[in-house]
Each structure stands twice: as structure tokens, then as C-alpha cells.
Image (cartoon, rainbow, N blue to C red):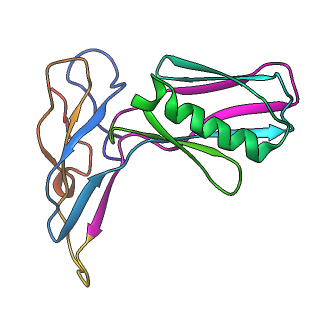
Amino acid sequence: NALANDHRVGPGALTGAIVSSVGAGTNGSVAICAQVDTLTISGTPAVDETFNITVNGKTLIYPVASTDLSTVTTNLVSTINNHADLKLLVKASSDLSGAVKLTAVTPGAPLTTSAASSAGGAEIAARTTTANGFVIYTPNPNYNGTATIQYRAWDQVVGTDGALLDLTSTGGGAWALV
């Protein structure tokens, strides 16, 4: 997590920061990982139950229309991906377990996701499965040695992107945001 030890110069904690760009990695490539939040549905859904899903202050009220969990999951994914506000923030998908994954449309952009269900047969919960601030380095084939990874971060509050930092020499602990 490139942002784990970074902080702003000045008052207040570093919150809502994004990795705004990455430089070319030496002997490999670097990419920003998108945050992924997962919605988990437990129990048997009840017809006319509702799921309230909020991402970054944008809320979807989803009316459950089936007791079949697979159908509910498939329809929920489609509804999120077609929702006027949510489709700008996340791309929904589902896996074999029935969980709904919400992947940030913009890698590096933080998500705040919550979920609740009305009185009914199922419960829905949200959790972050891939946190914001991660970058991934992929070495060139057969490379073995030291790599340099550079990134820029921004707290989305003050000014613009911070300095370009080198994770090899700073270990993520330098002040990217000034």
C-alpha cells in the first residue's frame, strides 16, 4: 500500500488520498490498483425486501423481486451498472460465491461503500477487499534484483499532486503531499 505511511505536512490526518499517477518501473511495469468493495448477501431474499447500497454518497434502493439468490445477484449487478450515479463510480460483477464486487472505475479513487437491507429474509453487508492506495509492480520476465517504483499522491484537499516518490529509497514513508 503506497499510501500506508504517507501524511500531509500541516494539521490533520491524511484521509481520502489517491495515488494519482505512477511512473515507469525499472525492469518492469507499474499500475495503480482499483479499490474493490464486496457486497455479501446472506440468508434467503424475500420478495419486496429492499437493499440500500451507498457508494460515495450516491444511494441505490434495490427492490428484491425474487427469492433466488443467483437471480437477485445477477439483477443487482445489472442495476448497479445501469444506475445513473453508481455507474460513474464503480463497475459491478459477481462471482461463483454470489458476492457482488464493486470495482472503482478510476484506479486510485477511494470508495466509501455501505449496504443495508430492510426487514426481510436476507442481510447484505459491504466490506473493502482491495484497499485504495495499492500499486502493483510486474517485473520483466526472468528479472531478479532491485526495482524502483515511483508514484504521485494527492489528498484531494490541498493544491495538486504531490512530489514523485521513489518507493525503493523511501519505502512509502516520505511525504508525498505537501
Identify whether 116 is placed above or below 124. above
Q: Magenta segment, principal secondary structure?
A: strand
Percent position of residue 148, x then y: 17, 61
Q: Quadrant of the C terminus?
A: top left
Residue 29 forms part of the magenta stretch: no
Picture quadrant where residue 63 is located: top right
Residue that extends furthest to the bottom in the rendered view of this protein: 142
The residue at 32%/39% (across/down) is 108
Would residue 48 appear left or right of 143 to someone viewing this image? Answer: right
Q: Position of residue 56 (x, y in %)?
A: 46, 22
Side of 167 relative to 46 (left or right): left
Residue drawn at (69%, 42%) of the image: 73
In terms of image quadrants, where is residue 124?
top right
Q: Nearer the viewer, residue 77 or 130?
A: 77
Asked if residue 15 is positioned above or below residue 37 in the image, the reply reads above
The segment highlighted magenta reads 109-138
Is 114 within the magenta?
yes
**Where residue 35 sits: x, y (%)?**
43, 41
What residue is shown at x 66% (from left), y 46% (from top)?
99
* Front residue (pair 99, 159): 99
Q: Hey, which quadrant is residue 142 in on the image?
A: bottom left
Q: Tell me if 170 is positioned left or right of 36 in this view.
A: left
- Pinpoint residue 93: horizontal percent, then vertical percent: 56, 47
Relative to residue 67, is residue 115 depicted above or below?
Answer: above
